[in-house]
Amino acid sequence: MKKLVLAALVGFVLTGCGGGGGSDESKPTPPPVVDAKPVAAQGTINKVNYANKTVEVNGHTYQVERVQYGSNALSIDDLKQNMMVEVSTLAKSGAVVSIEPTMVGMISAISPDRKTFVVNGVALTFDMNAEFDVNDWVMVSSLPQATADGLGYKVLSVVKIEQDDVDGQYEIEGRLNNLDQNTQTFKLGANTNVYFGDAIIEDNATLTNGQWVEVKGQMINEEFHATEVEVETYDDSDNDHEIEGIVTWVNSDKSQFELNARGRFIVNSQTRFEDGSKVNLVAGELVEVTAVNGVAKEIEFERDFGGETGNWHEFEREGYVSSVSYDHFMIAGETFYVDAYTEFEDNLKLETLNGVYIDVEGVIIDGKKVAREIEREDD
């Protein structure tokens, strides 16, 4: 009897060790990782593979079908690392890469230490190597930066170009301020004076202080004479539109934020965060935002970004409004300004604020407290 039991145990051990049953079957091959590219992306170029005609933007690799700057057709050889571009994958044969520089123009000055240079009346900080000289035409890509003078430019790249590539037309982007309809002038940033009396205003937009605008034209006697003015927003961002940029304002409960000083997004319970959390959503952070009709579907923090974007100053105040003017109001002797991105809650309007107890949140630009959100409060 013991021998029979021993034989049975030996048989069991042999079977369990794979003596005949299916251990040679190969494991299934895992499916390949697919790069789920957004339909449209705005951001800086991480790298270019000229031989394979591909470009990497926001971590996604695209096969390049066409490169353009406005109506000018360019070559993939014109694409350089850290250039700001917009990529569209609507073309079946590949992606259309549109170069979206912050400035295009001629270098009018370079400092002796080659740490700063001037384009379109704006002094910019960047290490200029020996290839650049005064009177060279360049494309400058940048992100918003908080400076002592207000909203400035953190330069990412400077690329030398041929004047013929851009038809000799200057371009500059920035925050519109000091608008004067009588003289038909405004300022971009702290230094560039713009005359727009002869310009085409795209989409018949109404120009307002605080808008981020793209201006094309000519530099004439230290003044930029505009031929075209276009208001830049993210209002038309639809599904799978991914945008890279600097957070330029966040409200107190982190339910809304502003990106690149030109568009606002809502944060809700469905918003996903990568490489960070809602706590990390503060002004000055570099993020990639995937937006759906103004709602942030995903926010990814760029933790390897080493760029200095300045010290962003925000504020929040409560109190009774004591007086109202065409572009500002006062609370307890403090002046608060409104602009194109000021949002009024609770059916409030600037002209009806006098005597109302409100809570106002905003950001300091050019030393001015600029309101971003105004709502009625119980005193």
Image (cartoon, rainbow, N blue to C red):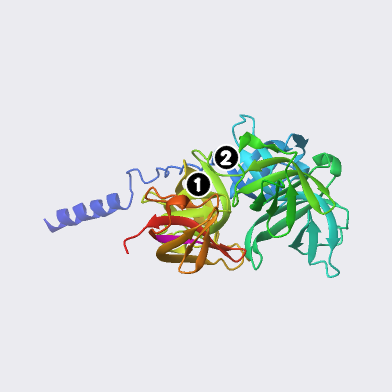
Q: Earlier in the sequence, mark 1 or mark 2?
A: 2
Position of residue 276 measured from the top left corner of the image (x, y, whole percent): 46, 61
Task: Specify whether 138 is left or right of 6.
Answer: right
In the image shown, does 21 or 248 lie closer to the viewer? 248
Give the tally of numbered discs. 2
Residue behind mark 2? 40
Label 2 neighbour load within 10 Å: few <14, some 14-19, many 20+: many
Image quadrant assignment for residue 234: top right
Task: Specify whether 371 is left or right of 158.
Answer: left
SS label for mark 1: strand
Residue at 77% x, 35% y is: 72
Task: Specify whether 367 is left or right of 342.
Answer: right
**Of all residues shown, which one is farthest toward the left?**
1
Quarter of the rendering occupied by the C terminus: bottom left
Task: Magenta stretch: give its range.
Answer: 358-362
Label 1 neighbour load within 10 Å: few <14, some 14-19, many 20+: many
Position of residue 255 measured from the top left corner of the image (x, y, whole percent): 41, 55
In the image shown, does 344 or 117 lie closer to the viewer? 344
Residue at 46% x, 40% y is: 293
Position of residue 163 measured from the top left corner of the image (x, y, whole percent): 85, 44
What's the mark number on residue 347? none
Identify residue type, mark 1: Thr
Residue behind mark 1? 290
Position of residue 100 measured from the top left corner of the image (x, y, whole percent): 68, 45
Quarter of the rendering occupied by the N terminus: bottom left
Residue 320 inside the magenta-drawn segment: no
Residue at 40% x, 63% y is: 320
